[in-house]
Amino acid sequence: MKNSRQRTLWLSVIFSAFGPFVLIIALTMNTSTTQFADFIRRTTELFVLVLALWTYKKLENSRNQAKDNRYKYMIYLASGIVLWLSSMILSFLLIQNLMHPVYPEGNVIIGLSVSGIGIIFNGYFAVRYTLFNKETPHAVMDTQGKLYQAKTIVDVNVFIALFSVLLFSNIETRYWIDNIGTMIIIGYLFYRGFKLILESDK
């Protein structure tokens, strides 16, 4: 069981590392605010995934309850803060886009591919971590399960926003779908981040 959990954490880091680099290329090909928001989210979440792997190893090797509590507090707090800060950055970008509209256009195929693959993989990891935590409660499994639930929901919204560029010829329709997608991402990240920060004190 221990090896399965650690292997899953390693796979999470490896798979997630590709997203930000691929999206750098995608960002040069279109003007979607939702996709830029997605790039920021994936980059900050990668930091949390690396921290989760490190924390898991520390907890497994520790026999000091006081240190264990600090590690648990740290992973809950870090996960919550990263999601919360992401929502704040995206709020700033959204306000800018509402004041100075940038209409989504260009090639969104790479972004669609990344978000589509993200829905599949993140959904899998969300279920995997949730089951791990149900079998044996663990701070890292709990935070990763909630993080991947958020990642899956956000990927669905990103996919819808980018697909609208292919589906609709009217740029106003694209613009509002893009902005509404960003608003949904902001709301969900803020809610989930706030909940994780509150759980850090438990």
Image (tube, grey):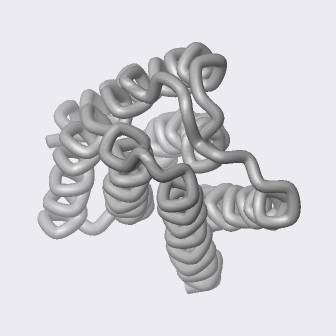
Q: Nearer the viewer, residue 142 or 84?
A: 84
| Number of numbered discs overlaid on the protein picture | 0
Residue reaching furthest to the front = 170
* Residue at 74 percent of width and 62 percent of height: 94
Q: Nearer the viewer, residue 18 or 72?
A: 18
* Residue at 44 percent of width and 28 percent of height: 108
* Residue at 60 percent of width and 36 percent of height: 39
Q: Is residue 99 above or below residue 113?
A: below
Q: Position of residue 101 (x, y in %)?
A: 77, 54
Q: Position of residue 185 (x, y in %)?
A: 53, 64
Image check: 150 left or right of 11?
Answer: right
* Residue at 27 percent of width and 37 percent of height: 116
Kindly tell me whether residue 101 is visible in this rendering: yes
Image check: 6 left or right of 36?
Answer: left
Q: Quadrant of the N terminus?
A: top left
Q: Is residue 7 above or below residue 62?
A: above
Q: Quadrant of the C terminus?
A: bottom right
Image check: 189 left or right of 150?
Answer: right
Q: Nearer the viewer, residue 90 or 152?
A: 90
Q: Position of residue 24 (x, y in %)?
A: 62, 19
Q: Is residue 202 above or below residue 172?
A: below
Q: Nearer the viewer, residue 73 or 40?
A: 40
Q: Position of residue 23 (x, y in %)?
A: 54, 24
Image check: 126 left or right of 161?
Answer: left
Q: Is residue 172 above or below residue 196?
A: above
The image quadrant of residue 165 is top left
